Amino acid sequence: MESIVDDLAAGLRSRSSHTLVLPEGTDERVLAAARLLSDEKMAHIILPGEPDAIRAAADRANVSLHDLLLVDPSIDDHLDAYVTAYLEMRPGANERVARRLISRPLFFAGSMLRASHADALVAGAVNTTAKVIEACLMTIGKADGISTPSSCFLMLIPASDGKTTPLIFADCAVNVEPTSAELADIAIASATTARFLLDESPRVALLSFSSKGSGKHRSAARIAEAAALAAERDTSIAIDGELQADTALSELVARIKVDPQGEVAGRANVLVFPDLNSGNIAYKLTQQLAGASAIGPLLQGFACPVADLSRGASVSEIVDTAIVTLARVTGRR
């Protein structure tokens, strides 16, 4: 099955210049993924953590650490600078506490991105989503103009010709009941993600049970308000809402339900769900019923490319998530 991920991986091989930090190097799946990414020349790999513990895990997994850079955060030459940067972000924080915190692999990895000593971060095989987000907020910070961290999945929908149709689903992992302003943040961040990953301009649909006023309810009005806010904040985004899922995806349905149709209805490639219930259910149904691959969750709204992993992620899922996260580096510097 041909996949956009294969194309992204080929692009990474041609450059072979990005650096990926994996702060969970004592996990055997992470080490196997790191080995593959390095062998395929898709990234330079950094493994922050206690070196002896990483070596022991590598022995258990029968994984060579050749060309993988092991960094001990507690004695690294950059630790003082990272602590200083952290204290500048959080005036009044205790320096001793900050040093203990930044010495942890996950927080050290975020500090590396903040200092441009690495390009992308992938974690979550060991740490919870909440811990990954906390570390990123405390060390990397939010992207300009975005107040709401969020997540998305790159969904690869199989087609009868053996190819896949890529869609961005957001937010499926972080925000439970986003307000209209938070949904606008999610829409703008998802459009940015789509610009890096899709071979076409983002067309963002904010989904509802209603299409352009066909259903009257405050929840539908919240979606319409979010679409208007996002469109006002970033005029470069093709965005519409509120739209039903079939109206967003089917040109035939869109011609019937929406007049004028616009750029998004019937042609959406970014779907923003009204809450976490609907987003999480939708991506898992798409996996189970359509045989789709779900890559992510990719974290959005941060100043640098980061991704979370399911703690049950396989080696191949870690590799795919790393590839997609690295692809988002383009144009950052």
Image (spheres, grey):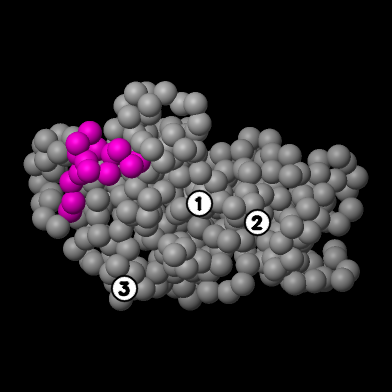
Q: Provide the residue designation for mark 2.
A: 188
Q: Tell me which label, 2 or 3, sits earlier in the chain.
A: 3
Q: Provide the residue designation for mark 3.
A: 15
Q: Quadrant of the N terminus?
A: bottom left
Q: Quadrant of the C terminus?
A: bottom left
Amino acid type of disc 2?
Answer: Ile
Disc 2 from disc 1: Cα separation: 14 Å
Q: Which mark is residue 22?
A: none
Q: Position of residue 255 (x, y in %)?
A: 82, 71
Q: Position of residue 118 (x, y in %)?
A: 33, 54
Most foreground residue, 248 or 125: 125
312 to the left or right of 35: right
Disc 3 from disc 1: Cα separation: 22 Å
Q: Provide the residue designation for mark 1.
A: 303
Most foreground residue, 267 or 55: 55
The magenta span reads 68-82
Q: Residues within 10 Å of mark 3 (few under 14, many from 20)?
A: few
Are circles 2 and 1 on residues that touch, CB within 8 Å? Answer: no
**102 in magenta:** no
Which is closer to the viewer, label 2 or label 1?
Answer: 1
Label 1, secondary structure: give it: loop
Residue at x 31% of width, y 50% of height: 21
Amino acid type of disc 1?
Answer: Ala
Label 3, secondary structure: give it: helix
Q: Residues within 10 Å of mark 1 (few under 14, many from 20)?
A: some
Say if residue 19 shows up in the picture: yes
Which is closer to the viewer, label 3 or label 1?
Answer: 1
